[in-house]
Image (cartoon, rainbow, N blue to C red):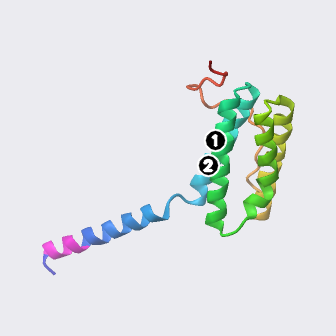
């Protein structure tokens, strides 16, 4: 095979591989890493009483959970966290700090139940204890 033809075939195969990877989107691990970060940000936003940020993070978590259900091909996640997500949205809408903390703990329990169901019990989620975002102010903005 001539080097030019081999190079063209190589480029074509590489292009097809890259296009295929772009079509598939992020995998479960990537989505769940973002979910964990959103979970952290949600906690600190709610704790600070930054309800617009908490509302935003609830929305982002909801979208992420929908993506996971699509990836898994069912409603496993929705069944585990759907109720707690509604509780969280209500607490955020009502600006209810105590309700927020309880709903957040219910969400966390739902996450862990889902992990158990999917044989990932080794991933145990809890309330965040420290803020990894030193570049974001979580206090309500005026």
x and y percentages locating residue 87 in the rendered image: 82, 44
- Disc 1 + disc 2, Cβ < 8 Å: yes
Q: Which residue is mark 1?
A: 37
Between residue 4 and residue 18, name the one nearer to us: 18
The answer to whether 102 is drawn above or below residue 26 in the figure is: above
Q: The residue tagged with tag 1: helix, strand or loop?
A: helix
Q: The residue tagged with tag 2: helix, strand or loop?
A: helix
Between residue 88 and residue 39, name the one nearer to us: 88
Q: Residue at x 34, y 70 (%)?
A: 16
Question: Residue 6 magenta-drawn?
Answer: yes
Question: Residue 71 magenta-drawn?
Answer: no
Residues in magenta, as a range: 3-9
**Res 120 seen here:** no
**Res 56 seen here:** yes
x and y percentages locating residue 58 in the rendered image: 69, 42
**Mark on residue 91?**
none
- Assign the C terminus to one quadrant of the image: top right
**Mark on residue 33?**
2
Q: Residue at x 65, y 41 (%)?
A: 38
8 horizontally vs 14: left or right? left
Q: Residue at x 45, y 64 (%)?
A: 23
Between residue 8 and residue 91, name the one nearer to us: 91
- The image quarter containing residue 51 is top right
- The image quarter containing residue 90 is top right
129 horizontally vs 59: left or right? right
x and y percentages locating residue 118 in the rendered image: 74, 64
The answer to whether 140 is drawn above or below residue 88 in the figure is: above
């Amino acid at each position: 095979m001539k080097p030019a033809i081999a190079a063209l075939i190589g480029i074509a195969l590489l292009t097809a591989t890259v296009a295929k990877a772009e079509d598939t989107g992020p995998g479960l691990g990537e989505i769940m890493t973002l979910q964990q970060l959103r979970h952290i940000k949600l906690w600190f936003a709610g704790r600070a009483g930054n309800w617009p940020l908490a509302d935003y993070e609830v929305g982002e978590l909801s979208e992420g959970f929908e993506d996971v259900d699509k990836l898994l091909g069912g409603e496993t996640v929705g069944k585990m966290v759907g109720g707690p997500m509604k509780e969280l949205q209500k607490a955020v809408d009502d600006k209810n700090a105590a309700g927020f903390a309880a709903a957040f703990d219910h969400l966390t329990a739902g996450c862990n139940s889902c992990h158990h169901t999917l044989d990932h019990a080794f991933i145990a989620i809890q309330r965040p204890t420290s803020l990894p975002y030193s570049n974001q102010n979580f206090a309500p903005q005026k």
